[in-house]
Image (tube, rainbow, N blue to C red):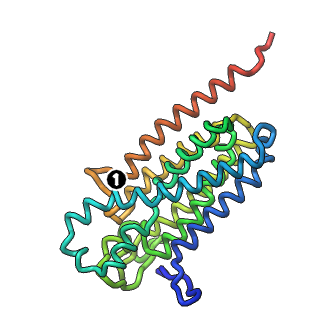
């Protein structure tokens, strides 16, 4: 675990934040590079792509920051005796410092949707370019999770090919940071690999069959299924677990339903637009 990546001007630079910024930047770059090859440049201006991406990033930051405190609040209340002993600065950094992907995804999509509707920009075309960029950027961000010790998996055997062992950590935040000295399933690595596979599938299908709006729907379908399954192998209970499902699994179900509905809708619309043979 390397939560502090390096020091700059006598300040510690966290690995989580660095890789989050790198992921967002890489995703934005990929979307711009795919703008014309995917045929989106025929219907949407480059300036609209850039503006929509900027607005979406603002929504990502807001949504990602707000979701985790809401999820953590019940756990903090129940175990307040333990958390009250943590230095205030460290507690606040932990409580508000971690950003949640699903919160960012929802916040970014909502911000982009309102912006595109307000300025009459085709949201389906814009979303197709970012459908590949999102999983790639997310894969980079998960490396920050691995180094920071968050989003960790269940305990596994030492011989497991995806086992990682974290060192000791201070201040009694064991429920927030991966437990030390035991082999833990490297969920961030597995999810990063899965995200890259999802990006590859979407890219191939979108180049072969350009259907406006279907790429983002396919992303929603594939990622929600992946996330739902991986949640069963997560060990960080502070993310919110209710019965046999977690908060992320409940969100995954909603996203899957919406994505399947959207995928069917745009596919039917495309089939109706095809000229009928005589």
Q: Can you say whether 53 is above or below 95 in the image?
A: above
Given residues 81 and 48, the one toward you in this image is 48
User: What residue do we see at 49% from left, 57% from top?
Assistant: 62
Q: Is residue 218 visible?
A: no
Q: Residue at x 66, y 38 (%)?
A: 119
- Residue 9 is situated, as x and y percent measured from the top left of the image, at 58, 88
Element class at badge 1: strand
Q: Describe residue 124's horizontal placement relative to residue 188 as left or right.
A: right
Q: Residues within 10 Å of mark 1 (few under 14, many from 20)?
A: some
The relative height of residue 177 versus residue 78 in the rendered view (above or below) is below
Picture residue at 55% right of the left edge, 50% below the top:
108
User: Residue beneath label 1, please?
Assistant: 246
- Whether residue 120 is visible: yes
Picture coordinates of residue 43 (x, y %)? 77, 37
Nearest the camera: 254 or 187? Answer: 254
Q: Is residue 59 left or right of residue 53?
A: left
Instruction: Pinpoint residue 172: horizontal percent, then vertical percent.
Output: 29, 80
Q: Quadrant of the C terminus?
A: top right
* In-front residue for pair 207/262: 262
Q: Can you tell which quarter of the image residue 167 is in?
A: bottom left
């Amino acid at each position: 675990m390397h939560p502090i990546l390096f020091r700059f001007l006598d300040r510690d630079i966290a690995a989580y934040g660095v890789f989050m910024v790198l992921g967002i930047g890489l995703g934005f770059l990929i979307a711009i590079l795919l703008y014309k090859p995917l045929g989106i440049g025929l219907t949407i201006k480059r300036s609209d792509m850039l503006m929509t991406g900027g607005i979406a990033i603002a929504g990502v930051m807001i949504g990602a920051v707000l979701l985790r405190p809401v999820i953590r609040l019940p756990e903090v209340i129940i175990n307040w005796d333990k958390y009250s002993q943590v230095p205030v600065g460290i507690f606040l950094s932990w409580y508000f410092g971690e950003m949640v992907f699903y919160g960012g995804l929802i916040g970014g999509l909502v911000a982009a949707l309102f912006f595109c509707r307000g300025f009459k920009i085709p949201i389906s075309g814009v979303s197709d370019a970012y459908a590949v960029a999102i999983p790639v950027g997310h894969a980079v961000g998960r490396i920050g999770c691995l180094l920071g010790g968050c989003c960790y998996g269940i305990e596994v055997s030492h011989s497991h090919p995806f086992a990682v062992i974290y060192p000791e950590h201070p201040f009694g935040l064991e429920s927030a940071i991966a437990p030390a000295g035991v082999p833990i399933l490297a969920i961030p690595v597995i999810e990063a690999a899965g995200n890259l596979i999802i990006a590859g599938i979407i890219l191939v299908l979108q180049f072969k069959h350009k259907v406006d709006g279907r790429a983002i729907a396919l992303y929603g379908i594939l990622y929600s299924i992946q996330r739902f399954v991986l949640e069963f192998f997560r060990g960080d209970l502070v993310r919110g677990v209710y019965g046999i499902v977690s908060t992320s699994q409940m969100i995954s179900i909603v996203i899957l339903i919406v994505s399947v509905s959207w995928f069917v809708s745009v596919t039917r619309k495309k089939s109706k637009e095809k000229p009928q043979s005589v």
